[in-house]
Image (spheres, rainbow, N blue to C red):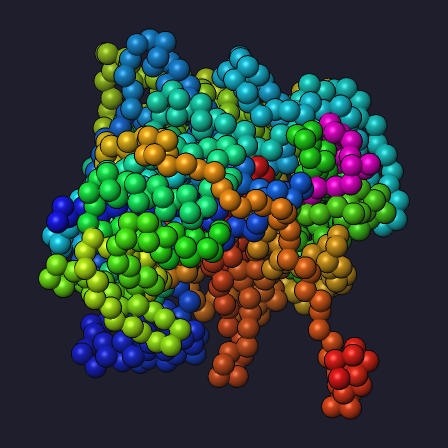
Amino acid sequence: MSGRVLVGVKRVIDYAVKIRVKPDKTGVVTDGVKHSMNPFCEIAVEEAVRLREKKLMKEVIAVSCGPQQCQETIRTALAMGADRGIHVEVSGKDYENLGPLQVSKIMAALAKKEEASLVIVGKQAIDGDCNQTGQMTAALLDWPQGTFASEVSVDGDGLKVEREIDGGLESVRIKMPAVVTADLRLNEPRYATLPNIMKAKKKKIASVKPADLGVELTSRLEILAVEDPPQRQSGVKVESVQDLVTKLRDSGTL
Amino acid sequence: MFPACKYTLQARQCLCSLKVLQREHLPSLICATRWSSSSSTTPRITSHYTVYPRDKDPRWEGVNMERFADEADVVIVGAGPAGLSAAIRLKQLAGEQGKELRVCVVEKASQIGAHTLSGACIEPSALQELFPDWKERGAPLHTPVTEDKFGILTEKYRIPVPILPGLPMNNHGNYIVRLGHLVSWLGEQAEELGVELYPGYAAAEVLFHEDGSVKGIATNDVGISKDGSPKDTFERGMELHAKVTIFGEGCHGHLAKQLYKHFNLRQHCEPQTYAIGLKEVWVIDEKKWKPGRVEHTVGWPLDRHSYGGSFLYHLNEGEPLVALGFVVGLDYQNPYMNPFREFQRWKHHPTVLPTLEGGKRIAYGARALNEGGFQSLPKLTFPGGMLVGCSPGFMNVPKIKGTHSAMKSGMMAAETVFSKLTNENLQSETKGLCVPEYEENLKNSWVWKELYSVRNIRPSCHGLFGVYGGMVYTGIFYWILRGKEPWTLKHKGLDSAQLKPAKDCMPIEYPKPDGKISFDLLSSVALSGTNHEHDQPPHLTLKNDNIPVNNNLAIYDGPEQRFCPAGVYEYVPKETGDGMRLQINAQNCVHCKTCDIKDPSQNINWVVPEGGGGPAYNGM
């Protein structure tokens, strides 16, 4: 086992910012808007760094796909403890169409190239909410997956993953190499402090193009329109049960 | 100051179980061995270490408080127009003369420009000096002013006032900008020149050499929980040492507040007076859009004794955008005044409403601004550092412009610091360099002349006819005499001392927001994108937790629940049913500093929260 961990990080619009739909309905306004690392990706980076600090893994590589600004996100991951970064350059129309399928192909190619033993990603991104990249990456690599991880521990030559599922908690044991997706309660990420940001400036970020990895970015999906959710109608207070029944009858519900 | 009682084991266990309760949002109730100035019935509000020092706090025993330190030539606090101009000028000079200079800028916003808020109609004079080729470099000055309108509003009508050339608010040659974008652009220029920019890291502490001169700053600690105890993620901030530290924190900076006291910089000047500016950006109907138009009004809804007015600027950047806002002088006397609601009701005026009808609000924010001008300028330099920008306060109030003078002060600071640093025969009395040349040069520059010529306009509004008296004064003494009159009028004193007790004032009836033109406070705050890590000590610290209810609420009916543009302060009934308590929603804070300025008890001390928190303004 090479002991290398590949961590995917995504640069998304900060969760506290109010989203505005572009007037031409092709997407949301991103120019000048505050961006930060996807919260689940922060948890993924933290977990990878902890594994390295426990000497269970040897190297943590942070990967991000996108335009030039992604390098800031990779720097944050480096400041949290990742050893080096890989920036997969995707911009313009390709970036607008970048979805889980394309990213998972890139991650799979990189995992093979870097001979990674483990790929950790956040369970989903807060902009797309797709919850697909980790799973697709595992499928493309034909590796086992431990998704919605709330606890990860090394068990011999494999991993024991505690998964948060609808019914409760599920424990699985998976052989390595494997893919893990991080859920909220996996850990509390450390802060990227200023001395670490300064040190991170000296760590390497390699730039790579998807074509170099043999990945084709065409999307099979086409965005038709992006719209605001319909305005919530305010409710009506009724004085009595009789009123309620009358109103329900009038609206045709009864 | 605060009795640091020795903890017994029992008390510790009591506190541990109380912590669990506290997490479920109950006020920390009575604990007999609790160590604070709160009485037994006032719930504990403040937990920040600036009020409760950690070296006396048993929860911090054994925690490693060492800090990593680094050296730079110049450290600049604040990446606003002044700070960035200083950084850029330093690097420009270093490049011209082939010298190496390490310049570090720390900024509490998560990205450069995210905490910048201004009208703004700027004079490009200082930018022209800094970058004569600003147009080719792509500086975002896209909207030259084409029309200048001024009016006095009554409840239903508008009286137009002609803007003659020579009056301070004449805007020929100026540009309407989104200052946040200009600051962002300045940040990019600075990075290209090799300035080390660190957004997301707030300067929390000033460091001193043994000889009393400024050694540099320390950034904020992270990982302290809401009750003041260390979390697992606790890490100390970092120390940045410099030969000279330039403080450009903007209006009413919290470190500047400490420096004024420490070096007695305000000995020979009047106290600074302020106003609060609230701003919104709207996308309006194209038919109503007049790019390049600048509109100002005074009058309704304020009375003649309350200084303030509105602005409405039509931007020309593609979309039909307008930047509009309302400014209220913080020397108002009626504690029932609510600047946010004055702004909202102004929008319903028959001459303002049509512009906004059919439009959509896309941004909101607020910030305090200086009004003291010439009379309130403190001493600007001290051993090891200096003050630039709106922090000491170079705003030209009648012109409503401060960006050009802020940038010029930053540039002058850089020039004088540079010649000091490169002076091989330099002999300094103190380890931190003192640069009195900065203040001398500034006094001989256009900034000083400009501020001097308009010094009497703001104070002239305190007379019998209020703002209108001020307008007459401006017409006579500024327009004709250019401010050469031999007298200098005084301000009224501290803004916080101007409030009358609530019983002597009439509550103001504000109309309800209609959700289309005017809005409620909470949805506005959400638009500012403000957020803070919730598990940290509230950064709006109270020197004494009892005073809000006993003084502010009792005498002034809690003015902080009205002047805060973000809904941070709320007086809510206590769960025990006997009276009210102050609830501080620190997460909402937009870093405007109004509370620190206007609190009649001067009990609120705004300190910087964890870096990266605060509003997420985009081109405000």
Residue B104: image quadrant is top left
Identify the residue shown where x is 57% and y is 37%. Answer: B619
Farthest top residue in view: B97
Q: Relative to B589, say whether B238 is above or below.
A: above
Can see residue A42?
no
- Give the main secondary structure of the magenta stretch: strand
Q: Is residue B292 one of those drawn in magenta?
A: yes
Answer left or right for B259 relative to B273: left
- The quarter of the image holding the N terminus of chain B is bottom left
Measuring from the top left, give residue A76's x and y in whole percent.
Answer: 32, 42
In the picture provided, is B448 more to the left or to the right than B359? left
Q: Quick check: is A181 in the magenta stretch?
A: no
How far across and down, in percent of the image, does residue B501 sit? 63, 63
The residue at 26%/28% (across/down) is B72
Q: Is residue A163 left or right of residue B269?
A: left
Q: Horizontal and vertical percent for residue A90?
A: 42, 34
User: Which of the image's four quarters has the C terminus of chain B?
Assistant: top right
Residue B478, compared with residue B236, is above or below; it is above
Which residues lie in the magenta part?
B274-296
- What residue is rendered at 36% in x and 9% in y? B96
Which residue is at 32% across, 34% downward?
A: A213
Q: How many marks?
A: 0
Most foreground residue, A75 or B576? A75
Q: How far across and how far down the image is residue B454, in percent?
A: 65, 27
Res B83 seen here:
yes
